[in-house]
Amino acid sequence: MTTTASFRWREPSILPGFGLAMGITVTALSLIVLIPLAGLFVKAASAGPADIWAVATSPRTLAALRLSFLGALFAALVNTVFGLILAWVLVRYDFPGRRLIDAAVDLPFALPTAVAGISLAAIYAPNGWVGSWLAPLAFRFTIPFTDVSIGFDGKVAYTPLGVMVALIFIGLPFVVRTVQPVLEELQSDVEEAAALLGANRLRTVFRVILPPVLPALLTGFVLAFARAVGEYGSVIFIAGNIPMVSEIAPLLIVIRLEQFDYAGAAVMATMMLLISFALILAVNLVQARARRRFGDV
Amino acid sequence: MSVAVTIEAIEKRFENFPALRGVSLDIQPGELVALLGPSGSGKTTLLRLIAGLEEADRGRVLFGDIDTRALSLRDRRIGFVFQQYALFKTMNVADNIAFGLRSRPREERPIASEISKRVKGLLELVQLPGLEKRYPSQLSGGQRQRVALARALAIEPRVLLLDEPFGALDAKVRKDLRAWLRELHGRVGHTTVFVTHDQEEALELADRVAILNAGKIEQVGSADDVYDHPATPFVCEFLGEVNKLPVKVVGSQAFFGDRPVLGGLSQNQGGPASLYVRPQHLRIVDETPLALPGTVEHLRRNGPLRRAEVAVEGLKKRLDVDLASQVAPAIGERVRLRITHGNLFAAA
Ligand SMILES: Nc1ncnc2c1ncn2[C@@H]1O[C@H](COP(=O)(O)OP(=O)(O)OP(=O)(O)O)[C@@H](O)[C@H]1O
Ligand SMILES: [Mg+2]
């Protein structure tokens, strides 16, 4: 597939409303998004090249960014798999308590993030309900012929693992709620057609059912990821916030603000913004391509 | 390759609603059978039962002498064309058609070059050569229909089942596809069952027509059989237009009121009955015995035919009469009608 290089406005419809809609869009977008972001760039730039470089490459900054982005990525991936399965179960099966679970999916949306964070921290703390049960599961082994050792030391709260638990918690509804309507709309006759053509269940699921869901799944993934990158409230209680280990980037920004290092905070914020923007844009491009190809039948 | 299909005393309920109430039907190898009936009569349900997509509460379906309950969906080798086509929209036309071949167990699966050759051949068969790379969203309704058919034919089905194959298409395309399907059936010769609620389509296309009403088969027969010799009042009314006259049978004559309207009856079924007469079987005649007097109240055109509506005393509904071109009564004119052919059913 090739994309055309020339740029053209999409033909405005003959129905009126384009001017008004465009005007409102640009105004609102400017007031709420563009102008504050521009302010951020200006503030960051005011630091001067040397300071910018120092903040951007300091080990603490890099460690925090790495934790935030990799943690968010991992959490979004877990949510994509788990959210898809959850949505599938909610759409396809009828069982007692289905409505209850369906409603519970939205709780991470509604709960104040601090409440979620404190609850998670309490449950996963070494003496908490889940934490005390996880402690005996500690293990560690060295991969043969290498120096790499992997393991789990029985702790979740106050470690990077705790950060991911919180990020998974707050991201789950995004995937479920974007995928659910698409699954509901899937025509059962396509599945029946596949079965009559001789496809086994596995092939039907992966070749027939999932591909049309993929764009929505990708959207859910991006939303969960974006939310997780910026998440603050629920993470800081369970993370333990040990610099270089379990300190997330948003927290480090707040710490810099509290130290009146506004430029430093702005530089970090700008870095987060640019990385997020690039990632989300990439995913959206992939998606737009899929949409164009398959259209709606 | 084609097999005989035997449907034995099938019953099917949805919750408490009886969708099929004891349906039996024998289909010969290579035969083209239409399931015809009004909406909700159970046509789709019967077709899905033959395919194995629904399970019967009672009765069974045989392919040759194999009970289909012993076969998996794959082993039934059914080519099914869904009403909405059910194409895989994330696959292009070639992948759609090849899907069945690629779904076979590894040892039975043709090699890639063989598959693409088969796809090409099938696309030619359905007269869409060169469309391999298109996606379903880039096809017209008629083209989708034919891709769906090619996909169903790719697995070399024992039985081909089509649910309202032309339902979603406009009248012109329907006519073209109808002729094409008839011709295709002549060439490939699958045992084929198709569902339709369009009686013209069923009569024109099928070797035999099975007419369903409220979960029961009312009559099975060739187009001529069911049209000329309807077994039940329902079949008579469902297949084309018909006038209905309440009559009384005495001896070999049918009386409307105290006037004899039809003679030479062989049935010994005295008493009240309903006489069904098609518009083309009413003729305006000069004075004869066995004629029905009436007044022309309306004249209209119905395609190539001219049609008079004649009011008859004692009958609420006007009679539709097809006019031979040379006779042209005026509105208000008194005429006499002779019934040249009618179907008599004892009143319920
Ligand atoms: N899954 C189902 N659950 C409950 N009732 C059903 C189901 N499928 C069909 N029915 C009922 O069974 C009856 C027969 O349905 P069917 O789809 O076979 O009709 P049809 O003859 O194909 O009609 P149409 O021409 O409108 O497609 C209908 O009254 C329908 O409401
Ligand atoms: Mg139907």
Image: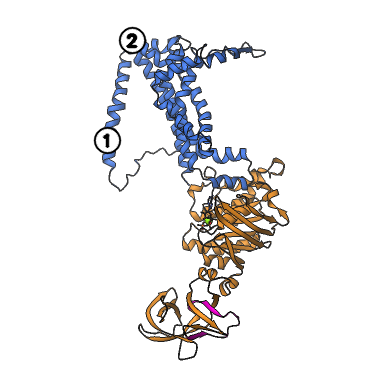
Chain colours: A blue, B orange
Q: Is residue A121 above or below residue B264?
A: above
Q: Is residue B338 above or below residue A295?
A: below
Tell me whether marks 1 and 2 sit on the same chain: yes
Residue drawn at 35 percent across, 12 percent down: A264
Image location (x, y in percent) of residue B86: 54, 49
- Outermost residue on the bottom side: it is B287
- Three-letter code, disc 1: Ile
| Mark 1 / mark 2, whichever is N-terminal | 1
Nearest to the observer: residue B56 or residue B138: B56
Residue A258's disc number: 2
- Three-letter code, disc 2: Glu
Describe residue B261's horizontal placement relative to residue B59 as left or right: left
- The magenta span reads B257-279
Mark 2 close to ligand 1, CB under 8 Å: no
Image location (x, y in percent) of residue B244: 48, 75
Residue drawn at 55 percent across, 40 percent down: A209
Image location (x, y in percent) of residue A236: 42, 14
Q: Is residue A167 above or below residue B24?
A: above
SS state under label 2:
helix
For disc 1, the neighbor class at 10 Å (few under 14, some 14 to 19, many from 20) is: few
Describe residue B90's horizontal placement relative to residue A36 as left or right: right
Q: Which residue is mark 1?
A: A24
For disc 2, the neighbor class at 10 Å (few under 14, some 14 to 19, many from 20) is: few
